[in-house]
Amino acid sequence: MKKTLLKIFAGISLAFLMISCATTNAASNTEAKNAASPKKTIGKFIVRGTENPEKLEKNDVMSVTTNVPNPEYFEFSNWSKIRTMNNLLDELLLHSELTNEQKYKLMSYIFDDLPKNASDGLVREVRLGNFFNKQNGDAKNLIIRITLLTPGKDAKVQNEKVIVIVSNAIKNQTTGEIIKDAGGFLSLDKNATVISAYNNKLLTNILRMMAAENNKADASKIGDLDAVMLAQSILADEDLSNDKKAHELCSKIIEKKDIMPAVKISAMMMEFDYRISLDDLEGAAKLWNEILAFSVNVPGDMNPENLNSTNGESLYLLKELLK
């Protein structure tokens, strides 16, 4: 699928340019007193947040969305939003750069009121302020573009929609680090990108659609570490009905006495994700406290600070989504 999307990427780049120009031109003619308006229709677009991308503060967010007549909005499960947001933060290496509040706001600007019945192509552009170094004006902002695609009848994997989230952040092809001096749109492979399939409120990263393989795995023939990795794959795949198997795998490992601390905490973190996927806020919060307390036994970088910045955000996001 990714090769096909790479071809589409070039075809929709003109649309990206058009919406960017429309946003900037509209903003330049708007008085400062209107810039704080949370949502406003300008021509063919709906602008949320400031109307001038050049006025974005560090890590502040704005969005421009195609104004669709009689819109029908996507319904995303909480787990869909959280795991897709984690994928995006992984790609952009933003876990430690944003506060939980900023992560929630960015997630809201990406997913809220996204029109499902929009024509295939670019639907929304989200900007995060002052992401790049040594750039003047609007070029310093991170730009995240959201494109909708409808799979054809001959698609190998049938989905209601495919959602492409591509940014202007360029990855170092050797290290995977984000090049922070400047940004630009090159290709889906070179830019920080997340491509997800949408079915029945669930978003699944297309690189992790492995339910058929996961469901065939014989857990009785694998070791503890492989069992944790299988649980991780199950929780990321497109079949929610197999998630209980991940829970069963992790529970057995957590209960073991003679287990390596790094393997046990990994199993605890997968069980934590399972609780998040069930919207079990109380259970997830209890387990998270246990994870932080146990982390002192684990050598390496699994300390409370790192765990809170890369995994603890899921608990905060769920708490906000359940309000």
Image (cartoon, rainbow, N blue to C red):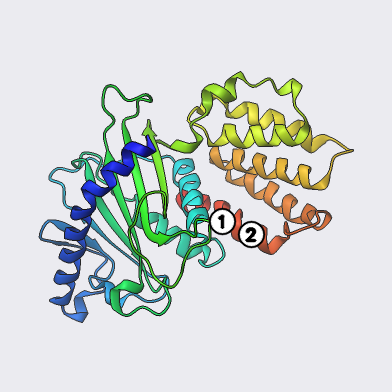
Residue drawn 46% across and 43% down?
78
Q: In this view of the protein, can residue 323 be seen by the observer?
A: no
Residue drawn 23% across and 74% down?
35
Secondary element at image label 2: helix
Q: CA distance from mark 2 to mark 1?
A: 7 Å
User: Which x, y percent locates residue 59?
Assistant: 42, 70
- Left or right placement of residue 27 versus residue 144 in this view: left
User: Which x, y percent locates residue 293?
Assistant: 78, 55
- Quadrant assignment, res 28: bottom left
Question: If the image is split into quadrants, where does the N terminus sit?
Answer: top left
Q: Residue under label 1, please give it.
A: 313
Q: Which mark identifies residue 42?
A: none
Residue drawn 81% across and 56% down?
299
Instruction: Kindly check if marks 2 and 1 are in contact, taking CB atoms under 8 A apart as contact.
Output: yes
Secondary element at image label 1: helix
**Residue type (three-letter) at the residue carrying disc 2:** Asn
Q: Residue under label 2, please give it.
A: 308
**Residue type (three-letter) at the residue carrying disc 1:** Glu
Which of marks 1 and 2 precedes in the sequence?
Answer: 2
Vertical relation: 131 (above or below) 264: below
- Quadrant assignment, res 222: top right
Q: Which residue sits furthest left?
A: 43
Residue drawn 31% across and 30% down?
160
User: Which x, y percent locates residue 3?
Assistant: 36, 38
User: Which x, y percent locates residue 7?
Assistant: 28, 42
